[in-house]
Every structure is written in C-alpha cells, then in structure tokens.
Amino acid sequence: MNITASDVENGILTATVTIPAADVDDAIKKAYRDAAKRYNFPGFRRGKAPRPVIDRMLGEGAVLAIATEDAVNAVAPEILEDLDIVPVKDGEFKVDAIVKDHEDFTFSVDYKMRPEPVLSSYEPVSIEMPPAEVTDAEIDAQINMLLAYQVKFEDVEDRGVEAEDFVTVDIKDVKNAESLAGEGRAVFVGSGSMPEAVEEGLKGMKAGESKEISWTPEGEDAEEATVEVTVKSIRARITPELTDELAKETFGFDSVEAMRDAVKLEIEQDKQSRLPGIKESRCVAALAERLELEEMDEDYEQSVFQELGQQFLSNLSARGMSLDQWLQANRLTSDQFISDLHHQADDVARESLALDALARELKIEVTDEDIDAEFERAGVEDVEASKASFVTEGRMPAVRDSIRRSKACDWLVENAQVTEVDEVARAAEGEESEEGASEEAAE
C-alpha cells in the first residue's frame, strides 16, 4: 500500500492512499463470499452461489460498494501507523469511486490534527518545592489538626463575636434575602456558610445585639440584599493545650516529644511517596504557562474531555458508585460537574501540548526498546502479541505519543531549578497577617 501525506494546513492533514490491485481483488472475493453466505439464492446452497448469480440478484455495483467499504476500513489503522499520527477526530474519508477487478484503488482521507504551538522558552523551568526534610511547621500543622478533633465550645458573654466562634442568630429578611431567613440559625464564623458580608458584620456583635447588614451578591443583574441579624448566643472555640498528659491519655504517646517524633516519621514517609508526583505536576504546569496559544482548539479539548470523562466513570464503576451517587455525595449538579471537567480538560490539553512542543525541540525519538518497556510496565504478559494487536487497531501511535511526553517530562523534572520553601510555615504566616489586618480594620 502506498500512502502519501500533505503538510498540515488549518489543522488538517490529507493522506492519499493507494491499495494494490492484489488487495483489491482479495476484498472483492471476500465481499462475494460474504454475500453468498448471507443471502439465499434459488438453486444454490448457502455460500455456493457464483458471482454472476449474485450480480444478477444483488447488482454488481452493490457488492463492489461493499468491497470498497471493506477495503478502506481494513487499511484505516495502517494509515495511522504508517504516518504515526493521533488525530483528534475520526478521519473524513473521501471515496469517489468503487473498486474494480485487478486495478489499484486510490482514495484520500482528511485528519483533524491537534495544534502544534511553540513555547516562549525551552529553558528548564523554575519551581518551588516543599523541603525533603520534615519541618517544625509541618509537624505543628499535623498536631494542630489532631487537636482540632478535641476542640470544645464554651459560652462567652464578655466580648463580641470573633472569627471561629460558633454563633446562634435570628435572621430576618429585609430585602432579597429570603433564603437566609430563620430563627436559631447556627453559624461558624469563617466557614463560608453565610455571605462574607454577613460573617464580617457579625464580628464584634455581642449577645442580644441586632444589626442590619447589606451586600450585593456576585453575578450579573444582582440586586442588593439586606438582613437584620440578632445574636442569640456566642460560643468560643477552645482548643486544648498539648501536654504530656493529653498526649498519653488521648493519643497514646508517652510524651509530647514522643508524639512529635511519631508525627514526624509519618510526614516523612508521606513526603517520600508524594514529592516526586508534586515535582512533576509543578514542572509540567510551569511549562504549560509558556505555551503560546491563546485559545484551545475546540475539537482537541473535546477529545481530552471525553477521555477524562471515561476515566472518571470507569474509576467510579470500580468503586461501585454511579455518577448520580457521586454528584449527590459532593453536592454538585451535573452542569457544575461538566463545567469543572471542561476546565480540567483545558488544563490537561495545554500541558500535553506543552510537552509535545518540548519533545519536538529536544528531538525525542521512540525506540522499539522504549515500546517494549512501556508494555512491560503495564504488566502485559505477551508483549509481542499485544504490540501486534495495537498495530492492527491503529493504537500504536498513541503509545509513542505517551512515551515521547514521558521522556520530555523526565527531562523537565531532571533539569528543573528548584527552590525549597516551607510552604506550611508560609501559609501560617499569611493567615496570621490576614488575622492581624482584620483586627486592625475592626478597630
């Protein structure tokens, strides 16, 4: 078979394919054999009717049309393999004639290809990473999380509402806030369960006080809303102090020091397993920021969207859960889920295109040994049989694509310039700064 391909123009690659006469004859013979088996022809046993009889009954053109379709479909995977391409959509075949005995047959097919944007830079990326060693801030954060399970709430009467207080309020709808109205409503200040303006307005109010709070919700054509809030009670969040006694009685450690050592070991093991993946994700995300592509190709994004959706549904099925059950558990609508999945698809598409661009720049090649190793890593028992199946089905170019991206990613990770940052400590400092600013504003 002879296959020639045009340059990609407007995202379309056109392949011109010529099927040899010998293969054409095989397709025609098969079409007649199938017709003889499929239909009853008077005077002949099923499968034994000769070609002239079949032509008279069905029409020569009808059988040759079937042979044409079969011949084209049979070589479709071979075209993908020969050109080593992974189109974003099925090919659009242009078959203007039907096959003839003992003659080559030529047709063309258009493939929609994914974009090939360039990067603004091919230099190694710079990223921030948590230190490999466990920090005191990380230990403190983990212990604080454990202590949070021991939190108690105590009634307070000598001060106004503060962040993280548990407040009981009566809310009266004054204007456009019917959904918030109610008596004895429980509000954890800072949880985001109420509009931000309401939670901020509660701060400083004392038990028994009432106040009107107004705000304009986000969104187009949103109208100002107003509520009257009356604070009924305030309960302060009390976190116990970590002492040797608490460490022993509640957490089963001999001392605070022993508890910190155990937490450190747990974090250390977690880091060993998670940091490589975090580094890879951050490197690829940083590379994707260099992609010179303003708007993602709709067809390519849709192909990624479908792939992500299929993977997600497959994972849910493996867990014995339906999509409806998952949506209910996560309090999402189907529209929200689809919107989120499209955002993910756009991100994944950009990262993939960025790795493709890097692979082209590095002139990465895929060897037979690379392919064998890929199948072995997948746990395939008969590598040769699986490879043959992939080639027959036209799926091997996708395997090569994956390997090229993996090699580009490996280069990216190995050459990344890393700055270690104690992100937990930085986040804690940021929270303290925000709290300080809020207190100053309140004063």
Image (cartoon, rainbow, N blue to C red):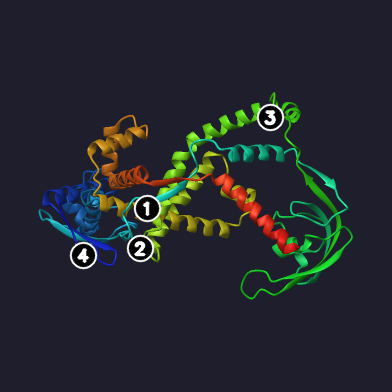
Q: Spatial distance from mark 4 to mark 2, Cα to Cα?
A: 39 Å
Q: Quadrant of residue 18?
A: bottom left
Q: Which mark is residue 256?
A: 3
Q: Spatial distance from mark 3 to mark 4, Cα to Cα?
A: 81 Å
Q: Secondary structure at mark 4?
A: loop
Which is closer to the viewer, label 3 or label 2?
A: 3
Lateral position of residue 379 relative to residue 239, left or right: left
Question: Dot 4, how many residues are within 10 Å of its Cα: few (below 14), some (14-19), or many (20+)?
Answer: few
Q: Secondary structure at mark 3?
A: helix
Judge whether residue 42 can be spotted in this image: no
Give x and y (percent) for residue 423.
54, 46
Which is closer to the viewer, label 4 or label 2?
A: 2
User: Which quadrant: the C terminus?
Assistant: bottom right
Lateral position of residue 186 relative to residue 148, left or right: right
Q: Amino acid at mark 1?
A: Ser
- Vertical order, 86 against 374 (above or below): below
- Return the residue at label 1: 352
Give x and y (percent) for residue 127.
43, 49
- Return the residue at label 4: 96
The residue drawn where x is 15% and y is 49% is 23
Q: Earlier in the sequence, mark 1 or mark 3?
A: 3
Q: Secondary structure at mark 1?
A: helix
Answer whether labels 3 and 2 touch (C-beta < 8 Å).
Answer: no
Q: Amino acid at mark 2?
A: Glu
Give x and y (percent) for residue 253.
68, 25
